[in-house]
Image: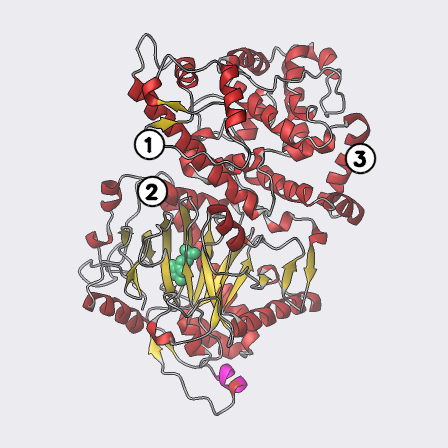
Amino acid sequence: MEDDSAAPSVASDLPLDTPTDDEESDQLASDMDDDDYYTRARGETCLPSSRIQNIVKAHGALGSLALSREAMFVLSVATEEFIGRLALQGSLNVTRQARHSFEYWDMATAVHDGAEFSFLMDTIPLPVTAQEAMELREERRKELIANDPALLESTNHLPLNGTTTSTVTKPKAKSKPNGKEKASKNANASAGGGRTKSSQSSSLRWDTAGGSNGQSASAPIASTSVSASSTRGSRGEAGWSRWAAEGTPFPVDPRLNGLLANANAHTAQTLAALNGLRSGDPAAVSSLLANPYQRTTLWTSTSASTTNSRGASDNTTPTSERPSSSLTTENPGRTIYSEPKPPPAALSVSSLLNLTTMTQTSNLPIINIAPYLRPANTPEELSARKAVSDALHGASLRFGFFYLDISAYVDASVPEELTSLARTFFHLPQETKDEISLTKQDNARGYQRLKQNVTNGKADNHEGLDMYRPVEHPDKTKPLWGENQFPDVPGFRKKYEDWIEKMKALGLIVMEAMAVGLGLTPDEWTELRAQVDDSFWVMRAIGYPPLPGDHDGFSCGAHKDYGCLTFLYADPTPSALQVFLQQPGTTNGASESQGLPAEQGDVEGVWINADPIPGCVVCNIGEMWEIWTNGLYKSTLHRVVHRSSNYRVSIPFFFEPNFDAMVKPLAAANRILGNSAPEAKPVCYGDFLMGKVGQIRQLKCRGPFSRF
Ligand SMILES: O=C(O)CCC(=O)C(=O)O
Ligand SMILES: [Fe+2]
């Protein structure tokens, strides 16, 4: 054993009296069984000083300097902390996939999801599919040959499609800290184009070791290869494309390695199946989809192929690229994926992190807006639209919440990038963020500190950045009438402004689809459209640190959105957003001091999770829809309880009526309700909004839209 087992060491023992490697591993093995958890006692660390010293030396950080005991100790403690956090972040992915083992892929996802780990992007890149790796390698081969035709002879023998295993060298299971130098030579040789057979062999490590299941054995191979070829500090670089360019090994998803392990016989079949899967061939689909791991892997990989330069995670795989047979239609217009539902996240995350969240898994409908994005010239297209509208109507009646599948409308990488930009902003020092504080403008536009927002009288455990529709003659002394403030984060403003345009357009599309669902005539729709065609929208970026156990409140307290439609994109954190479904006779603790607004009374119901679904935004209807429909559609309470260890980011876009819109019950709603329904009071949206601001001022809350 060379480097990764260790016995607890005591600071005062440092640095000379640590046991030898063998003693350490023996001690570790005997001291701790699988069920023992290591708890660090004060003044102790579980990493031996010799290891720390070796690592520090190997990085050349020490030179001739001596490392003090204290420095060594804090390095060790910090390392423990780091391992713990990275593992927790990775475990979110395990939970999300409802799996029981922690794999290479989870680590890669953790690195690509959590900005704090972005420096590891080169070291633990996202896997690509075998097929993609092969295509990339083939491209690289052609390039090399074009540059040096003499290579043709030797490369013809290369197992470029992964079908030959004989030349492959199995890497050592463990590498010395300084083992990377040796590997780098291979990587450099490849990068320089002077590929010898042996360097090419080493580049095929990924598809051979690991036997038929390939999972555990292959992961370290990928990671070993990566660190061998990675360039430290090139964090923004595209993982796999750089690999392709350098001709170095691709980190192929370990589970695919399993498929390829018995390569000669199986690769052709596997590739055919992969191709079949992509093209929706039912036989290929059923053969590969029999194993849920493979299925998840393939989607992930598809995502990687379209969005890898930003390190896309599995949770953002465009749904349009899913195997078509994974879709079934239940009830007209309600498209529900037949893939396993997101895991029972509240429960599993809770047990994982020893938390209690009384929620059940989301069962909200998924509605694909695609038919409204294309012309409706044929009866089929018209009926597809009708189905969407019916589904929207049903979801608005029953839940006030639904998933809107917008994968045909935006590439998943776009909102991912926006959350990442927001994360970058939130990670800036407090004083930098305060430079664009909303107090510097109209108390609404700009940055709002952690706990500044108050809901139901309690501080919310989040920070935020608000942008509003710009106004013609800004005057920051007037509520809401100032100017937007953008962070000094490269690309932030442009990317957000582009997204806002997309969401505004989406707002109108969904409004039209809902109007049809509610039964508006074309003329009535024209009238309604005129109330929302210059939306006084709000774009928010919200940052949620984990909710401390002793916080008197929530990440975001229970509230209804007060406008028209909310399109919420959030990072893949599960078990954060919860929706309150009224169910007389049922409660999972919702009404017992669960922070429901006072006016809600003793209502019975359940909190369900609305975890992110790839390709979708969570959409909910605001209070204006309650007025338009005279109470037929309900704006539903929701809240955020984010207890996982990561920093969660969400970016809701609030599509609101025009500032001067007079919102009143629509005739179409009254046709459904009959004459007996009491008429809801009309409101001018701008006044309503200003009323919210006024309330907040009276209560001296600093948040612009504290919710009551
Ligand atoms: O962050 C979330 O998931 C929800 C935020 C929200 O409900 C709001 O800002 O109105
Ligand atoms: Fe909300």
Q: Position of residue 152 (x, y in %)?
A: 72, 14
Q: Is residue 394 above or below residue 75?
A: below
Q: Residue at x 48, y 13 (%)?
A: 20
Q: What residue is shown with label 2?
A: 425
Q: What's the amino acid at mark 3?
A: Gln
Q: Which residue is mark 1?
A: 42
Residue at the far left in the pictured view:
477
Label 1, ligand 1: CB separation under 8 Å: no
Q: Quadrant of residue 368?
A: bottom right
Q: Earlier in the sequence, mark 1 or mark 3?
A: 1
Q: Secondary structure at mark 1?
A: loop
Q: Position of residue 4 (x, y in %)?
A: 51, 22
User: In the image, which residues are magenta?
Assistant: 667-672
Give me the disc on residue 269: 3
Nearer-N-terminus badge (2/1):
1
Nearer to us: label 1 or label 3? 1
* Quarter of image, ligand 1: bottom left
Structural distance between the alpha carbons of marks 2 and 1: 35 Å
Q: Determine the secondary structure under disc 3.
A: helix
Local crowd size for mark 1, using a 10 Å CA cut-off: few (<14), some (14–19), many (≥20) = few
Residue 73 pos. (x, y %): 34, 23
- Image check: 650 left or right of 689? right
Q: Residue at x 68, y 41 (%)?
A: 294
Q: How many marks?
A: 3
- Of all residues, the one furthest to the bottom in this rendering is 676
Q: Secondary structure at mark 2?
A: helix
User: Furthest-front residue in view?
Assistant: 30
Quarter of the image where the C terminus is located: bottom left
Viewer can see residue 612:
no
What kind of residue is marked 2? Phe
- What type is the residue that disc 1 sits on? Arg
